[in-house]
């Protein structure tokens, strides 16, 4: 065991690289959802909702739309 007061560099990475994190997230998929309500005097005036699915594209999985997509 190496004592804490030695001046040797660390032997490995301290965190997860961003590329590895994005690869893992896109391989499994992530759902992002949220609500924003703008209110004055406890009266809600505007409500914005966000629901998004982030996932990688795979050629083996067909598109769920018959015409190729909504765009």
Image: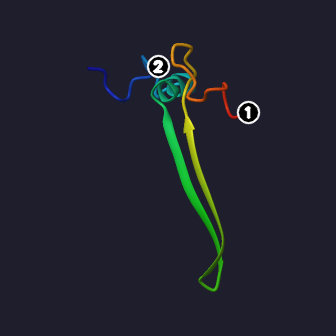
Query: In this picture, is 18 found above or below 35?
Result: above
Quadrant occupied by the C terminus = top right
**Which x, y percent locates residue 59?**
57, 14
Q: 34 above or below 55?
A: below
Q: Which residue is mark 1?
A: 71
Nearer to me, 38 or 65: 65
Residue at horizontal 54 percent and vertical 20 percent from the top = 62
Marked residue nearer the N-terminal end (1 or 2): 2
Q: Secondary structure at mark 2?
A: loop
The image position of residue 5, as x and y in percent, is: 38, 29
Picture coordinates of residue 34, whole percent (x, y): 55, 55
Using residue 37 as the reference point, say whether residue 32 is left or right of it.
left
Mark 1 to mark 2: distance in Å? Answer: 52 Å
| Label ID, residue 20 | none
Task: Please name the residue shown 48% across and 24% down the image.
Answer: 27
Image colouring = rainbow
Badge 2: how crowded within 10 Å, few (<14), some, or many (20+)?
few
Residue 41, position in %: x, y?
63, 86
Tag in front: 1 or 2:
1
Furthest-top residue in this view = 60
The residue sitting at 26% across, 20% down in the picture is: 1
Residue identified by numbered label 2? 9
Q: Residue furthest front?
A: 66
Q: Residues within 10 Å of mark 1 (few under 14, many from 20)?
A: few
């Amino acid at each position: 065991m190496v004592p804490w007061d030695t001046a040797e560099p660390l032997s490995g990475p301290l965190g997860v690289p961003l590329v590895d994190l994005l690869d893992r997230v896109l391989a499994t998929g992530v759902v992002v959802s949220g609500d924003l309500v703008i209110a004055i005097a406890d009266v809600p005036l505007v409500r914005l909702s966000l629901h998004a699915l982030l996932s990688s594209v795979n050629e083996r999985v067909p598109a769920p739309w018959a015409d190729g997509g909504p765009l």
